[in-house]
Amino acid sequence: GLDAPSLLKTALAQGNLKVIGADTLDEYHRFVEADRALERRFHPILVRAPGIDETIRILQGIAPSYETHHQIQYQPKALEAAARLAERYLTDRQLPDKAVDLIDEAGSRKHIRLISIPHNIKVLEQQHQTVQRDKTRAFDAQDFEKVASLQMEILKLEEKLKSARESWQADRSKVDSVVTEEDIAEVVSEWTRIPVARMVESESQKLSRMEENLHQRIVGQKDAVSSVADAIRRNRAGIATPRRPIGSFLFLGPTGVGKTELARALAAFLLDDESRIVRLDMSEYMERHEVSKMIGAPPGYIGYGEGGQLTEKVRRNPYSVVLLDEVEKAHPDVFNMLLQILEDGQLTDAQGRTVSFRNTILIGTSNLGTETLSPEKRPIGFIQSEMPDYQEARQLVMHEVKKFFKPEFLNRLDDIIVFHYLEKEDVRQIARMFVDELVERMRKRDLELEVEDAVIVKLARDGFDPVYGARPLRREVEHQVENPLAMKIVKGECPPHSKVSIRLQQNDIQFDIEPAAND
């Protein structure tokens, strides 16, 4: 029997049929180009996606239809914003389709705001219906006294309803039915979770105090915090290059000084949720065959179609902090992929989808070079002191970094930041932060904790280790405070609503428990 292409080819060859078809490139390659005879009957015309200017003209042409449908109006700047923002932020779709969807959604939202009945009117209407039913039942039961009472209540409710509706109509007249560029930006923000809306005063103040906010969690790293904050402000002010990530940094320095914590604090500041950080432990990508997991397994391999561990997370959360922990442990092929992200702000996954990294902050952390900071391993020519000062430490670390990483990778980073060693005063501040976190956790368990400053000083002194940073301090807090406190709670010595005073007596930490007054 003849199949459809054979019938079509005959009709086309005889000139009995004229066909105009539309297809995607992938399907054209798959179904038409595979049949050479069928391919000769068609003249392919490649229709490219329009640019921003062409899209604006298209939107201006179709806007009247949407205005009639939604009973609203579009500002000319709103149409321009739809084309511009769709091209920049909706990277997985094409113009003009995504821009048309934007103005449609924005118009629909504006219309719903205009016609939606306020909650207080709905409540009054429900009360009116309920009383009306009660009146009908009372009338059927010939309880005329109750009928009269309910009639009075109905009249009062009708007066309230009339007043509420008049107030609503007055408010509606004040609501503008014009869709603005801020309305378009609001839709884009909700679709992508990227804060593209024009900065309001509250956000402006928040960004201006960004260093102060981050320093509440990051101690002793002024240079690192300032560099990251400057990158964020450049992006939100619209000054940064739009085709590159918001910021790209390499955090260097000894363990326990706050490299990973700064990335978490940044995610908490920008996204209000530090768990939304995209964190990859680069020690998992030490072998060549592991590298493909970042963008997805290629066709024919197990896991094809599941999405990459990096690309899929960023595709779902385009506005995120990407943390590449211990980046020096990754296979060299990983850095070839990172070059594409740093230069073009995008990466193609195994499915052929282009994933945009232009709204991410890329942070790599590394301990590279820190082993040379110990006196016995310091290169010849450097001062053999107990601990190097910051400039000497930076010089030692950068010497090792330049030997390990290729110049094309280092040159594409916005900044390479060497974290400072923690001083004794820094450790004291961190000890206070650890204790304050414990106090807050205990407050949620209905226990009041009061910790003397002398206890903080002792914890900071016992936990101070310039080589290992704040991690020994964390262990001291667990060993000297949390473990004894947990034992007392388990034994029932700290009933709910008790007050626990932690003080220092003869260099030993003591716990004084004051039960609640009703215990």
Image (cartoon, rainbow, N blue to C red):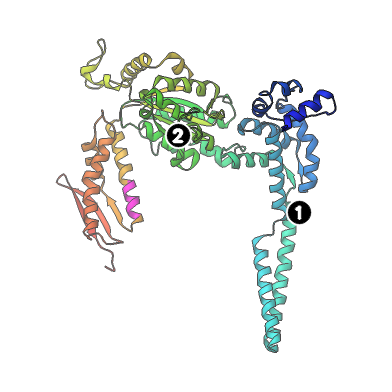
Q: How far apart are marks 1 and 2 (CA)?
A: 44 Å
Q: Is residue 91 left or right of residue 425?
A: right
x then y, percent, for residue 159: 72, 71
In the current view of this chain or complex, which residue is farthest to the left? 506
Q: Which amino acid does label 2 sit on?
A: Glu
Is 442 magenta? The answer is: yes
- Comparing labels 1 and 2, the label whose residue is closer to the camera: 1
Quarter residue 252 falls in: top left
Marked residue nearer the N-terminal end (1 or 2) = 1
Q: Which residue is outermost to the front? A: 1
Q: Give the range drawn in magenta.
A: 436-443
Q: Is residue 26 above or below residue 110?
A: above
Front one among 67 and 6: 6
Quick check: is 379 in the magenta stretch? no
Q: Residue 211 carries which label?
A: 2
Q: Is residue 25 left or right of residue 459?
A: right
**Which residue is disc 1 drawn over?**
173
Specify the farthest residue to the right: 16
The kind of secondary structure element at disc 2 is: helix
How far across and how far down the image is residue 316, in percent?
53, 38
The quadrant holding residue 463 is top left
Closer to us: 402 or 447: 402
* Secondary structure beneath label 1: helix
Q: Residue at image x 79%, y 29%?
A: 20
Q: Where the C terminus falls, by quadrant?
A: bottom left
- What type is the residue that disc 1 sits on? Ser
Q: Residue at x 69, y 31 (%)?
A: 95
Of residues 30 and 421, the one drawn nearer to the viewer in this rendering: 30
Q: Which residue lies furthest to the top in this view?
A: 381
In the image, residue 60 above or below residue 152 = above
Q: Where is residue 505 in the image (x, y as percent from the top left)?
A: 16, 48
